[in-house]
Image: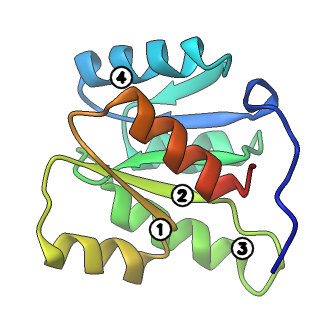
């Protein structure tokens, strides 16, 4: 069993991919309350663009977005990571709770799951789990 990281939440670089401005604003405010400064984008294509310039410790990925959804963006990220040892944790965010969507998230390479509406405690828990924080 690996040792948990002792990185404070506030030192994490988080990318939030969410197309709906209200959800984006709420999630960013929650992250801010945890001391996390996050960047946000509105679709999966923008996720891929920003990843060409920056790296992140965690991606919070809405599953249903225009232009490119979270599943397709995640598959593309995983493909680009290839066999490298570093795979950025990607947490699926969705209002849909079907088993099929959870399975699709897992198949795409997502490493966590967060149901909307997002609750502060659930958000912190999934971040800690995905990043291996104690």
**Rounded to the nearest whole Å, what is the CA distance between mark 4 and mark 1?**
19 Å
- Give the mark nearest the N terminus, 4 or 3: 4
- Give the mark nearest the N terminus, 2 or 4: 4
In this rendering, the answer to whether 103 lies above or below 23 is below
Q: Which numbered tag is attached to residue 24?
A: 4
Marks 2 and 4 in Cβ contact (< 8 Å): no
Name the residue carrying label 1: 110
- Give the mark nearest the N terminus, 1 or 2: 2
- The residue lying at 67 percent from left, 19 percent from top is 37
Q: Residue 110, position in %: x, y?
A: 47, 68
In this rendering, the answer to whether 87 lies above or below 124 is below
For label 3, the crowd category at 10 Å Cα-Cα, with few meaning under 14, some 14 to 19 and many 20 or more, is: few
Number of the front mark, 3 or 1:
1
For label 2, the crowd category at 10 Å Cα-Cα, with few meaning under 14, some 14 to 19 and many 20 or more, is: many
Q: Residue 50, position in %: x, y?
A: 63, 39
Secondary structure of residue under mark 1: loop
**Rounded to the nearest whole Å, what is the CA distance between mark 3 and mark 1?**
13 Å
Secondary structure of residue under mark 3: helix
In this rendering, the answer to whether 56 lies above or below 79 is above
Q: Residue 128, position in %: x, y?
A: 63, 47
Name the residue carrying label 2: 90
Marks 1 and 2 in Cβ contact (< 8 Å): yes
- In the rendered image, the residue lying farthest to the bottom is 83
- The residue lying at 58 percent from left, 13 percent from top is 32
- Give the mark nearest the N terminus, 4 or 1: 4
**Rounded to the nearest whole Å, what is the CA distance between mark 2 and mark 4?**
16 Å
Name the residue carrying label 3: 81
Marks 2 and 3 in Cβ contact (< 8 Å): no
**Nearer-the-camera pick, 16 or 4:** 4
């Amino acid at each position: 069993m690996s040792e948990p990281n002792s990185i404070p939440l506030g030192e994490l670089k988080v990318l939030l991919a969410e197309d709906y401005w209200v959800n984006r604003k709420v999630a960013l405010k929650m992250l801010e309350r945890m001391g996390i400064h996050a960047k946000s984008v509105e679709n999966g294509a923008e996720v891929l663009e920003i990843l060409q310039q920056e790296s992140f410790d965690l991606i919070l990925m809405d599953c249903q977005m225009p232009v490119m959804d979270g599943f397709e963006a995640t598959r593309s990220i995983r493909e680009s990571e290839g066999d490298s040892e570093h795979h950025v944790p990607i947490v699926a965010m969705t209002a849909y709770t079907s088993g099929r969507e959870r399975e699709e998230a897992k198949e795409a390479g997502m490493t966590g799951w967060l149901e909307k509406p997002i609750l502060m405690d659930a958000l912190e828990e999934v971040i800690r789990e995905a990043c291996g924080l104690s």
